[in-house]
Amino acid sequence: MRLHLVIAVLSLVLGFNAIAVFAKEAQPLAADPQLEKRVNDIAKELRCLVCQNQTIADSHADLAIDLKNQVRDMVGSGKTQKEIVDYMVQRYGDFVRYRPPIKPTTYLLWAGPFILLVVGVVLLISNLRKRKLAIADTPLSADESERLKSLLSADVSTAGKNSGGEVKPS
Amino acid sequence: MSKNIRYLVPLIIFIVVAAFLYRGLSLNPREVPSPFINKPAPDFTLQKLENMGEQFSNKDMLGKVWLLNVWASWCVACRQEHPLLVQMRRRGEIPIYGLNYKDAPSQARQWLKQHGDPYEISVVDFQGNVGIDYGVYGVPETFIIDKRGIIRHKVIGPISTNILNECVMPLVKVLEQEDPQVTPTEYQRVEGCA
């Protein structure tokens, strides 16, 4: 009777083990989807140092896989994202972060696009102003208004006739 | 006056951009500056490759200037620097210790038998954990560590004769002169290492 119980328990344990091993072999990522999601979120913030334009989430380089495992271990042991990123920065420098930190050496990097935008807007406005000034109405001088009057009246009197403009050959 | 300058603006912009791009060409993106320079070398205690029953720790080296060379039998670039390391050991100028990184110990021993062993001791970092602690991202890498256990320089990639003569040996000479009891206010640097 007792032996049966032992065997039952043993087979249960071994059975579970077998399942666990199998599950791990088949798809280790699905072991805990929530944990895996957190691992992935953090891995997306970290640059793979071997293939430099990829995050360690995207990369299949050996180092990226090692670092992802490291992240997984650390998430598993309850470390926060900040702690994990700090750990990586301590070892690989700021370069490992996909989002560079805001500090004196990176002020220009962060502010650069906005500075360019402001410069562009200022240039645009000043150019528009200049152009507006260039095409502003200037009143006709006395001579000119005299000439305009005579041209207009001549135009009325010679209506229907050609006054020297271009003529379509008939 | 202002009209004349206006025509120069595109030229000036071009020169500035060209200067930046030219500078960019001469930089090596693989050489990520190590945050460990002038910081204490991370502690490790690992099994010795030649005698797995014994352990070696970086703390055993306090008081000495030494090199920690990260290597592996699968690493092709390591073969490039290897003859130089063997030569250095023969001259006995500086002790070289090996960190056998993510390698099968049997293959590593075989490799040393075949190519010569430049290391006083090699230690086994089978999982690569110590490698991560040291921020290793490519093999070979060589750390120059001073008497107080501070990393003073890191050579990324194989050591060439040039790097050895211009950077490594001059720096080692400077470090040999230092008194381990005194904490320097400013770490001395060597021009060849810049």
Image (tube, helix red, strand yellow):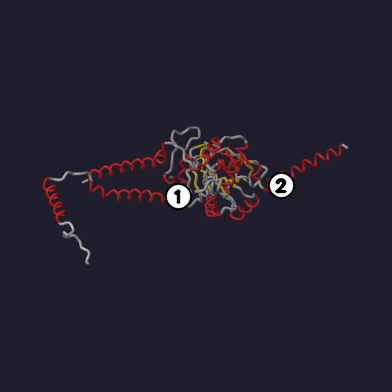
As drawn, B65 above or below A164: above
Q: Where is residue A168 in the image (x, y as percent from the top left)?
A: 22, 64
Which three-letter amino acid code belongs to the residue tagged 2? Phe
Q: Which residue is drawn at 62% across and 49% down?
A: B103
Q: Marks 1 and 2: which is nearer the front? A: 2
Secondary structure found at label 1: loop
Could you tell me if residue B95 is visible in this image? Answer: no
Which three-letter amino acid code belongs to the residue tagged 1? Asn
Quarter of the image for the C terminus of chain B: give it: top left
A6 with respect to B26 (left or right) = right
A15 with respect to A123 (left or right) = right
Q: Position of residue A164 (x, y in %)?
A: 16, 60
What residue is pinned by disc 2?
A22
A65 with respect to A18 (left or right) = left
Could you tell me if residue A55 is visible in this image? Answer: yes
Quadrant housing residue A126 = top left
Task: Name the residue nearer the viewer: A84 or A158.
Answer: A158
| Disc number placed over residue B28 in the picture, else none | 1
Provide the chain ID for the residue under circle 2: A
Task: Name the residue nearer the viewer: B176 or A100.
Answer: A100
Cα gap from disc 1 to disc 2, whole angstroms: 45 Å
Q: Position of residue A136 (x, y in %)?
A: 22, 44
Q: Callout 2: few (<14), some (14-19), or many (20+) C-alpha neighbours within 10 Å?
A: few
Provide the chain ID for the residue under circle 1: B
Secondary structure found at label 2: helix
Q: Where is residue A170 in the image (x, y as percent from the top left)?
A: 22, 67
Q: Callout 1: few (<14), some (14-19), or many (20+) C-alpha neighbours within 10 Å?
A: few
